[in-house]
Structures are given as C-alpha cells and as structure tokens.
Image (tube, grey):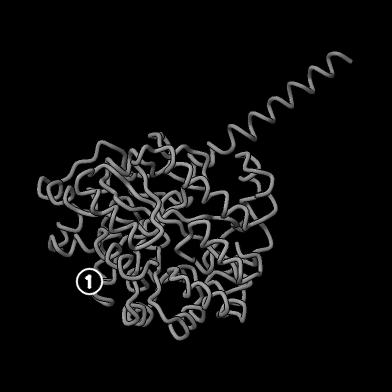
Amino acid sequence: MKKVLVGVCVLLAIFIFVFFIYLPSSLDNKWNSGYAHPPYKASPEAQALHKTLFIADMHNDSLMWNRDLLKKNERGYIDIPRMREGNIALQNFTTVTKAPRGMNIDSNDGSTDNITILAVAELWPPATWFSLKNRALYQARKLHDFAARSEGKLVVIRSADDLAKFQERRLKEPGITAGLLGMEGTQVLEGDPGNILVMYDAGFRMVGLTHFFDNEMAGSMHGVKKEGLTEKGKEMLRLAEQRKMIIDIAHSSAKTIDDVLTLGTRPPMVSHTGVKGTLNNNRNLSDDLLRRIAAKGGLIGIGFWEEAIGPITDLKATVRAIRYAVKVAGIDHVGLGSDSDGSVPMPMDASGMVLLTDALLKDGFTGDEVRKIMGGNLAAFYAKWLP
C-alpha cells in the first residue's frame, strides 16, 4: 500500500510539473519565436534615424503568457527591456480570451477553446476559467500591475492627454515606454453590449470586434456565417464611440467592415493585417477596403507574420506589404501591426526593430516616410481620436 501511495504521489508530482510548469513555457517557446536573433546589425544611417523615431506597434498578445514583462526574457518577442533596446515607445497590448482548436483563416465555429487550458495551466484566477470577460479583465490588471511596478518606465495610455504628457516626458527620458489596452474580440462582452463600459473603466481603449470566430456582436472573416454587425453589435458600436474608443476591424468579415464604415462616426483601425495585393488569402484586405478605410481616416497596421505577408526569413515581405499598402491607401494611413507573441513566428524580437528601419530605407522610403510608418501615424491618430 505504501509503495502504491508513493507511486501515486510521484505520478501526481510529474503531472503537476508537466502541466503547470513545462507546458506553459513549452508552448510559449514553440509558438513565439523568431528567425533572426541578436545581435542585430543595421546601417549607420538606419541606426541614426532609428534613435530619433517614435516607434509604435498596434498589436501584441504578450499578456496571455506567463512572463514578467518588466524583466528581459529569453523567450517570446517583447518585454519592457527589449522595447527599450529597440526604441519602441508605444505598444498596443491586446487581450486574447478564446482560440478555437484547429484555428484557421477560413472557417471556425467557435465551439472549442484552447485558452481555457492555458488559463488553468498558468494558474490564472479561477474566475477566468469560465468567463471570457474575466479573462480580459485579468490581463488588463496584469498590464496595470506591470506599470505600477515599473518605477515609471511603463505608462498605460488612456487618453490623448496621457499620450501628450508621455511624449513630452520621453523627450527627456528616452528609455520610458507606454502601453495601450485593446481587446481581441467582443466575445468578452458575453452577449451584453453594456459590458463595453466595464471594459472602458478597466482601461481598454481599442475594441477588436472579432477574433477567429463569429460572436454575439459581429461576424469574423474566419467565422462560419461571416455576417456583419448584429443588433447588439450596433448598440455596442454606439456605446463605444460615445466613449471615444478606437474600433479595430482586424479579423472582421467584409460585411462587418462595411457596417463599421457605414454606421461608424469615427475612423477605424486595422491593428494587424496583410494585403491581398501581395498575398491573396482570406486573412488579408482588398484594395477596395484599403481605400475605403483610408477615406474614412483610418489606420492600417501591417503584420510581421507569414499568413499576412508571406515567408518571413527576412523583412522583405514586410516591406513589400507596407509598400503596397502605402501605394493604395496613402502614406498617412499605414503603420505597424506585428501580432507579436500571438503564437506566430516573428522575423526578429523587439530589440531588433532597427532592422525594419534599415529595410525601409533600403527600399527607397524617405526618412520622413519611415518616421510616419514606424509610429508617427499611430501617434497622430491617437492624439486626435483617443478620449
């Protein structure tokens, strides 16, 4: 009996180690990797320009992983030390709350979920295990906690005034960084449009309407029905715009995008995408949508990952997609939407952002154009449209 009890205890210990320690870090290592590793080398011209840029990225999923972003990590794409090394001033941190098994860019019914397993394995609070709203709020608290413990090195942006003060302070303290909270999919509202006000009070300023499946508010380009805004979605849009929240139409179906462009009173953002002009798949935006988003005053974030831009063994595919988006939408409507730490490989980690500055210059973009693409456009957008 004693031997049996010892065996059970050993098996239990092995299970605890594998499920709660090995599994989360193993998944993080497997899915959030890059092709190029430091040290990163760039031309003297690019290095000089890079130091003067306000670099801002529209999409990142680090908050779902069990990492202290105040410390330099050996896995994943980003943390505050590597943001500082890469001169990244502002990062949109989005909250992933549900991801279907077998996730693909064409059709997902949303009946399964991988994030539940991750939430349990990473020891998220039990309230998050069965509530998508609580998962988003938990990740929001993580960002606020990082900021509180950062000794001023990380600031959470909630308003245009916050941004202006941060930019002014950064002129004297170039190493400080900022984050803005966004949700990836309004499934976090759990069917109640009024919950958008709960998200606003928690610090969310960017509303990603959908992720990889249709939800109660809107249709996804990767969903089954791919319909537009529901009646609840239209009410949610109205409430969000009253609070001057930014509407993110990444992952949204063509009908949802059309509804937002028609019914919305403010310009939308596409936080992370590719363009059909360089890679024609269901994930990417057509020329017509690029023009319509730009005509509304919107902003388009070009991603760094393969399904958006093609093979990423170097930055040529990223630059090619940026060049195409600029040609169609205009230089003032294009920025960066990496999708870093979103379970997709990256061409480099955050500390290597100078490589993109170098690649843009080598492709013939001027210094002023690089300044806009690398973050100037996003800063101007937020200055005008945040509360």
Residue 294 x %, y %: 32, 78
Q: Identify the residue at horizontal 70%, vertical 25% (top origin).
A: 13
| Secondary structure found at label 1 | helix
Where is mark 1, residue-wise? 331
Residue 198 x %, y %: 57, 62
Label 1 sits on what residue type?
Answer: Ile
* Number of numbered labels in the structure image: 1
Quadrant for the C terminus in the image: bottom left
Outermost residue, left side: 45
Quadrant housing residue 161? bottom left
Residue 367 x %, y %: 13, 60
- Pick the residue in front: 253 or 146: 146
Please say if 171 is above or below 262: above
Outermost residue, right side: 1
Please state if 65 lies on the left or on the right of 335 as rendered: right
Please state if 340 lies on the left or on the right of 43 as rendered: right
- Pick the residue in front: 309 or 374: 374
Quadrant housing residue 376? bottom left
For disc 1, the neighbor class at 10 Å (few under 14, some 14 to 19, many from 20) is some
Q: Is residue 252 visible?
A: yes
Q: Is residue 321 visible?
A: no
Q: Identify the residue at horizontal 60%, vertical 62% (top origin).
A: 188
Q: Identify the residue at horizontal 45%, vertical 81% (top origin).
A: 264
Outermost residue, top side: 2
Residue 193 x %, y %: 61, 72
Quadrant for the N terminus in the image: top right
Please say if 80 is above or below 378: above
